[in-house]
Amino acid sequence: MHAFDVLGDPVRRRILELLADGQRTSGDVVAAIAAEFGISQPAVSQHLRVLRDSGFATAEAKGRQRLYTVAPERFDEIDAWVQRFKRTWEPRLEALATEVAREKKSRKPTERA
């Protein structure tokens, strides 16, 4: 499955956001996602399976719990894609930073509040 097909789903993106803050049990993920999106435990489990099968998350069995973690390697594909476009906006952001710095220098000390 292509990376953007996986990340196109808002539930899966939210799960990854939760996992980005650190390892979580499947129960924690289910509770947070069910409360936020109003979906069932089996539906959340299916999303977790897609993330696991696609390489965006890993699961480790610890007793009766499953601990989920973000798998950063898969994000390399997304980063490579984004880098193709970075050259489009980077000069604009640098120009904006220059203008902001220029404006700050031109203000009088009493104007800075």
Image (tube, helix red, strand yellow):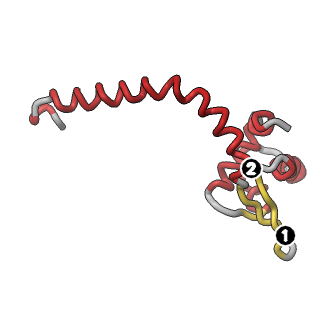
Q: 10 Å neighbourhood of mark 1: few (<14), some, or many (≥20)?
A: few
Residue 82, position in %: x, y?
62, 33
Q: Tag 1's secondary structure?
A: strand
Q: Earlier in the sequence, mark 1 or mark 2?
A: 2
The residue at the point 73 percent across, 55 percent down is 71
Give the amino acid type for the residue marked by disc 1 in the picture: Ala
Residue 68, position in %: x, y?
76, 61
The residue at the point 23 percent across, 27 percent down is 102
Residue 98, position in %: x, y?
30, 28
**Residue occupied by mark 1:** 61
**Residue occupied by mark 2:** 33
Image quarter hosting the C terminus: top left
Rendered view: 17 above or below 8: below
Report the disc number at residue 24.
Answer: none
Give the amino acid type for the residue marked by disc 2 in the picture: Ile
Rendered view: 67 above or below 102: below
Is 107 left or right of 40, judged from the image as shown? left
Image quarter hosting the N terminus: top right
Q: Tag 2's secondary structure?
A: helix
Q: Say which quarter of the image contains residue 84.
A: top right
- 3D distance between C-alphas at marks 1 and 2: 20 Å
Of residues 25 and 39, the one drawn nearer to the viewer in this rendering: 25
The residue at the point 52 percent across, 23 percent down is 88
